[in-house]
Image (tube, helix red, strand yellow):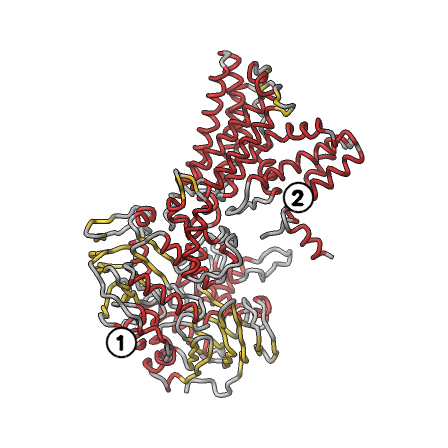
Amino acid sequence: MNLVPEQEVLLAVNDVSKSFPGILALDSVSLVLYAGEVHALIGANGAGKSTLVKIIAGALQPDRGNIVVGGKTFRALTPLLARKVGIAAVYQEQQLVPDLTVAENIFLGKEPKTALGRVDYRRMLAETGELIQAYGLSIQPSDTVGELPLAQRQEVAILKALKEQAKVLLLDEPTAALTGPQITFMFRLIEQLRKQGIGILYISHHIDEILSIAQRITVLRNGKNVGTFLTQDVTKEMLIEKMVGRRIEGTSSFSRKPSGDVVLEVQHLSVDGIENVSFLLREREILGLSGAAGSGCREILRSIAGLLPPRKGQIKLFGKPFHPRGTTDAIQQGILFMPEDMRKEGLVLPLPFPRNITLAKLQKVTSRGVIVPAKEIQAVQPYIASLRIVAPSLWAETRVLSGGNQRKVLLAKALFTDARIWLLEDPTQGVDVETRQEIHRLLIEARNGGRSILLFSSDLEELLALSDRIMVMHKGTLVKEVDNPATVTAQELLSMTLGG
Amino acid sequence: MGKALLALFGGRNVLVLVLLVLALTTGIVNPRFLTLQNALNIMLQVSVLGIVSTGATILLISGGLDLSVGSLLSLSAYIAGLVILRFQSLPLAILLAFCTSVGFGAFNGLLAATERAHPFIITLGMMTFLQGIAIAISRGSPINGMGGLYEIIGIRDFLRIPLPVFVFLAVLVVVDIFLRYFPLGRYAYAIGGNQEASRLSGIRVGRVKVILYTLNGVCVGIAAIVLSAILDSALPTMGSGYELRAVAATVIGGTPLFGGRGSVWRTLLGVLLLGLVSNSLNLMGVSANLQNVVLGAIMVMAVMFQGSK
């Protein structure tokens, strides 16, 4: 056991629950962080990791439960309060001011003053230099933060937290942007902090990394804590099983018509983030794409949608070369991309929702180039009915619809647009179980109706249930093809995407 | 109490209410206010601002902005004046004035479509640039006497309603139809509401922006002709201040600055409010300096009470 013997409790989260419209993000989760431990927090997407971290950092307030820190009990924290009691969140680089130097950032708001009341730069630089040396870092106090590489900006953020006497450090995917030697270096720094008695809550989905750095591991699944384990007691396989769980679902028994001819052919495609990827997509087929962050799945969808120009290789559509110069070309060819972040890229929120459905193909509701409102309302109604979109009225702004209904609006748009090829990114992200199943049913119906769907999902159960075939991506290359998803378990798929 | 007040002031119908109260009190203080003649007077006074604001509404809905409209109005009107002075040709004058305003409107659109800077900053630069040209070619001197233009638009009326008012209402109706029933109008709302989503829906965002800024230029051209007709002269600075008052009228009317929503009828309300306030202050004998204080205060209150929906 590497734990500090006395096991001083730095932070205790007790029975914390948090719900968002339509979903229970955290369901009475408890967690204890000791001084001098690296405590890993893992879970699939949507398991509630980031909600929990935000609650601890004070960015979100829980509905129920409390947080005990420094011997005091809080019903909820605010960002300011969290910092006061010694909790520091290091999310990539957000809290740093890019135009200021390392020293200025570390002392921001707490600048030492000279006798005359001016900022004592000499002392600031000197103290920062000492701090950097103490941790064996290679940055200079006078470096401008914005010019540092991401790895070092993260070090500055950690130093800043230390300067503020943080006892609890929240690290969210600290190695996401790092490469081999940088990761080793980051781990050395974390180990050093741990030995000083700092408690580190470490969020990551790199299980191998977690096994090598954490003393204890807490697994979240569907907003619940499904167990906290000592690292020496678990294996990678056990953790994956805990993460995935055994969800019982009736989705595997869809009846499928056989796939048809090849519709889309991608040959030796290379764009930024993917290297030499080839595959075929058929009529009446759902081709699953599986891969962790940075695996290139999103880039594949975006380059077919005309958003990322290919560096090498080509795309053939119905046997003819296809060079989309933009999304307009793609849509004219019947290719519709539905991004995961629908509020940012997918939907025009201030528009009444029927107008989002018709937006990509207004010519269907015009007569001699003029929109006919009655025709528009009439045209969208069957989709609203068959997708069971619930809205206060036909004039309701898309903004006021629930997340699940917004997803359905996006799918209604795909149907209305007569898109033959759907490029989908996490189509059930953030929706409740019922809507999820409805969306699954719709996708299978669309497939059987002759559509071809390229589906990227970080929900492995979803991929297995919906896909006719699955392509597994890892670090920009296609590493595996699963021809019969029925024979594969979520655990097996997860270990494939993790490069195993 | 505060909440009740906010709820009361939450909707747009508040503006109608404010307009009515204002009209009523002024009418009691000065009975001349409630005459048909005065109503027509107000309409005439706001017609130019109304035309410019209608163009601004198109841009604000699409998330754009053009601060150069005041300078562009001056330049276009002055060019028309020059042509009338030199060649005595009314059609040529109107044609060249339109070419100027439409051309620079389109140019602003092209610059905005590059996405290299916020339209605020681009058109702020264009505002100085165009004002500079107007002053340079005029050497600061006004042109008096717009000849036939003044006789046609400036003094004529129909059914006792001055022609500029008809022009304003016509612009309003045309733009309203454009925004409601034309795909381009729909795209203006879409781009203003979410540019990325619009692009992913296959809308050629840059092209649409150029067209919308060009339409704004058309409005400026019409306003330039109408204003120089009313004044029967062309001054190199006659349009300055219109850019901000147009944005103010649009926002007071209830079209938000950040795009995706709005209509020209709201803008009509905003324009009328501004016109009504200065008219009632005039009739109540409030001095010009104090009028600005009141006008400014009303603008701030109007936008604050509309809340940030």
Report crowding for label 1: few under 14, some 14 to 19, many 20 or more residues within 10 A (C-alpha). Answer: few
User: Which residue lies most toward the top here?
Assistant: B87
Name the side, left or right, on which A113 lies relative to A338. Answer: right
* As drawn, A159 above or below A31: above
Return the residue nearer the eye: B52 or A359. Answer: A359
* As drawn, A225 above or below A166: below
Q: Dividing the image into 4 quarters, which one contains the N terminus of chain B?
A: bottom right
Q: In which quarter of the image is residue A180?
A: bottom left
* Residue under disc 2 on the same chain as residue under disc 1: no
Amino acid tagged 2: Leu
Return the residue nearer the eye: A368 or A273. Answer: A368
| Chain under callout 1 | A
Amino acid tagged 1: Val
Name the side, left or right, on which A446 lies relative to B122. Answer: left
Q: Where is residue A322 in the image (x, y as percent from the top left)?
A: 24, 49
Viewer can see residue A159: yes
Name the side, left or right, on which A376 lies relative to A67. Answer: left
Which of discs 2 and 1 lies nearer the camera? The answer is 2
Tell me which residue sits at (63%, 47%) in the image. Answer: B12
Q: Where is residue A185 in the image (x, y as percent from the top left)?
A: 37, 70
- Classify mark 2: helix, strand or loop: helix
> What's the mark number on residue B15?
2
Return the residue nearer the eye: A492 or B47. Answer: B47
| Chain under callout 2 | B
Q: Where is residue A196 in the image (x, y as percent from the top left)?
A: 48, 78
- Measured in 3D between alpha carbons, the distance from the residue under mark 2 to the one under mark 1, in whole angstroms, is 64 Å
| Residue that carries the numbered disc 1 in the rendered image | A488
Q: Where is residue B247 in the image (x, y as percent from the top left)?
A: 58, 39
Viewer can see residue A69: no
Report crowding for label 2: few under 14, some 14 to 19, many 20 or more residues within 10 A (C-alpha). Answer: many
Name the side, left or right, on which A286 lies relative to B2. Answer: left
